[in-house]
């Protein structure tokens, strides 16, 4: 599960040239939560989308269930996500870190998960465009898998992480080919640090 993450321009140094034309207030978010608007990358380039996917068939933009995460094991089957999956509407969500709250000594403790080299974590996701009359919403969801053994004590689920060399393949391949990338990792490659809260960073 992923319910909070950050996009810190300074931390995502490999992306700085690509993001040079974007206003810093759009990609310097320290505490991104579902329904917030954030930067995503699809096959056509960068776009701002709101986090929590609204399927195009929905009659209402306000869903009665959470769609900010999609389980990788069932993403091709669940009604909320299967149309976007079939149409290969996959995206990448660059993040400098994400947050989980495991229970430590009987209390929830916020932990920050980031790459050990300080580069961006690339979450695999799906995007959708919902429109009703003149009302249009561009949204996305983050796909999740079982967590690697080194971080499953933080949470049993983790965002799907796309390796740098698989970016183009993830964004452009067929749904059948994309299934091969939706797999749990043996080693997350992430550092876990206890913090007071995302807002305190």
Image: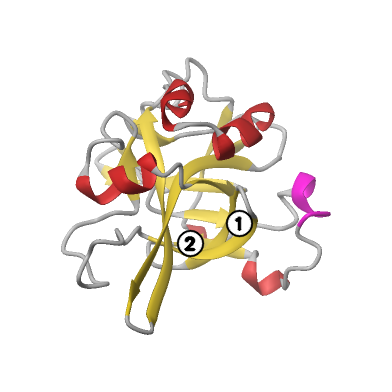
Q: Quadrant of residue 35?
A: bottom left
Is 26 situated above or below 98?
A: below
131 or 6, which is in the foreground? 131
Q: Which mark is residue 32?
A: 2
> Would residue 69 be found to the left or right of residue 115 on screen?
left
Specify start and end residues of the magenta stretch as a single range.
13-18
Q: Residue at x 48, y 31 (%)?
A: 174
Which sits earlier in the primary sequence, circle 2 or circle 1?
1
Label 2 environment density (alpha carbons within 10 Å; few <14, some 14–19, many ≥20): many
Graded by Cα atoms within 10 Å as few (under 14), some (14 to 19) or many (20 or more), the crowding at tag 1 reads many
**In the picture shown, does residue 42 fall above or below 163?**
below
Q: Which mark is residue 7?
A: 1
Can residue 154 be seen at all in this image of the molecule? no
Image location of residue 112, percent across then percent down: 51, 44
Task: Write the residue at 64% across / 58% down.
Answer: 46
Do the numbered discs 2 and 1 sit on residues whose CB atoms are within 8 Å?
yes
| Residue 11 appears in the picture as rendered | yes
Direction from residue 147 to residue 97 in the image, left or right:
right
The residue nearer to you, when weighing 158 against 66, is 66
Under circle 2, the secondary element is strand
Give me the residue at 41% from left, 25% from top.
Answer: 176
Q: Quadrant of the C terminus?
A: bottom right
Secondary element under disc 1, as helix, strand or loop, is strand
Membership of 67 in magenta stretch? no
**Residue 20's quadrant in the figure?**
bottom right
**Gap between marks 2 and 1, in whole Å?**
8 Å
Residue depicted at 66% across the width and 57% down the height: 8
The quadrant of the image that shows the N terminus is top left
């Amino acid at each position: 599960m992923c319910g909070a993450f950050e996009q810190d321009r300074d931390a995502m140094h490999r992306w700085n040239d690509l993001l040079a034309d974007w206003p810093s207030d759009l990609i310097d978010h320290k505490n991104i939560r579902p329904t917030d608007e954030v930067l995503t990358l699809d096959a056509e380039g960068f776009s701002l989308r709101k986090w929590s996917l609204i399927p195009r068939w929905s009659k209402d933009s306000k869903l009665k269930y959470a769609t900010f995460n999609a389980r990788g094991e069932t993403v091709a089957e669940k009604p909320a996500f299967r149309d976007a999956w079939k149409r290969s509407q996959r995206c990448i969500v660059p993040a400098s870190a994400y947050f989980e709250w495991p229970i430590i000594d009987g209390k929830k403790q916020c932990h920050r998960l980031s790459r050990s080299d300080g580069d961006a974590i690339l979450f695999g996701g799906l995007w959708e465009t919902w429109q009703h009359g003149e009302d249009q919403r561009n949204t996305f969801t983050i796909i999740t898998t079982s967590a690697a053994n080194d971080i499953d004590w933080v949470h049993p689920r983790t965002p799907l992480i796309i390796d740098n060399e698989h970016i183009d393949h993830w964004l452009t391949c067929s749904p059948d080919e994309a299934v091969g990338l939706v797999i749990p990792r043996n080693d997350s490659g992430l550092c876990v640090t206890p913090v007071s809260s995302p807002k305190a960073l």
